[in-house]
């Protein structure tokens, strides 16, 4: 065990954990941030997506040491304009069914809109390809991303 310093949702945290522990388990088990979900443990489903320095990252395969000195944002701390727009669109369009994958979906969608405020369907499909939804709400997810993009475009600067 060793001490690992992290910045999670803007707050400095120090954990006494194995530096090779997946970030997912540090978030869930040591910091009680349970919005980030375990899905496959192999970076294939996207349920564990968080942002590290603004980039969508699979926390199930990312060692906690790799996040040291970087900005980690979980669904609980997603408060960017793109993040708020995505969350609002998700609710407005009633996107989730079971909801299990939705935090990862939202994190990936917010990262997409932060880097590409006017995505095409192909852009959305490419950015969201690593996020699996067992309920197959992909059409509503794409619609919500477009709705969030429109909301961001209409927002006053």
Image (cartoon, helix red, strand yellow):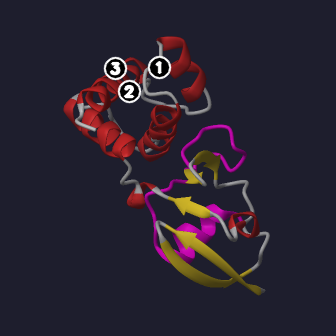
Q: Please state the extent of the stretch shown in magenta in the rendering.
A: 22-49
Residue 27 position in % (x across, y down): 55, 68
The C terminus sits in image quarter: top left
Circle 1 packing at 10 Å, graded few (<14), some (14-19), many (20+), is: some
Q: Earlier in the sequence, mark 3 or mark 1?
A: 1
The residue at which mark 1 appears reads as: 119
Circle 3 packing at 10 Å, graded few (<14), some (14-19), many (20+), is: some
The residue at which mark 2 appears reads as: 145
- Measured in 3D between alpha carbons, the distance from the residue under mark 1 to the one under mark 2, in whole angstroms, is 8 Å
> Position of 142 compared to 151: left or right?
right
| Depicted 27 relative to depicted 144: above or below | below
Q: Determine the main secondary structure of the stretch shown in magenta.
A: loop
The residue positioned 65% from the left and 46% from the top of the image is 40
| Depicted 113 relative to depicted 147: above or below | below
- Measured in 3D between alpha carbons, the distance from the residue under mark 3 to the one under mark 2, in whole angstroms, is 5 Å
Nearer-the-camera pick, 153 or 14: 153
């Amino acid at each position: 065990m060793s001490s690992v310093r992290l910045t999670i949702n803007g707050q400095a945290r120090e954990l006494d954990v194995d530096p090779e522990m997946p970030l997912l388990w540090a978030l869930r088990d040591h910091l009680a941030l349970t919005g980030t979900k375990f899905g496959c443990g192999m970076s294939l489903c996207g349920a564990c997506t968080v942002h590290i320095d603004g980039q969508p990252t699979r926390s199930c395969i990312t060692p906690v040491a790799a996040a040291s000195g970087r900005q980690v944002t979980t669904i609980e701390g997603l408060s960017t304009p793109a993040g708020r727009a995505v969350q609002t669109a998700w609710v407005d369009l009633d996107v989730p069914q079971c909801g299990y994958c939705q935090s990862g979906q939202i994190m990936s969608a917010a990262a997409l809109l932060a880097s590409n405020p006017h995505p095409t369907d192909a852009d959305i499909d490419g950015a969201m390809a690593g996020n699996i939804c067992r309920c197959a709400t992909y059409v509503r997810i794409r619609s919500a991303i477009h709705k969030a993009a429109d909301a961001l475009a209409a927002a006053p600067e």
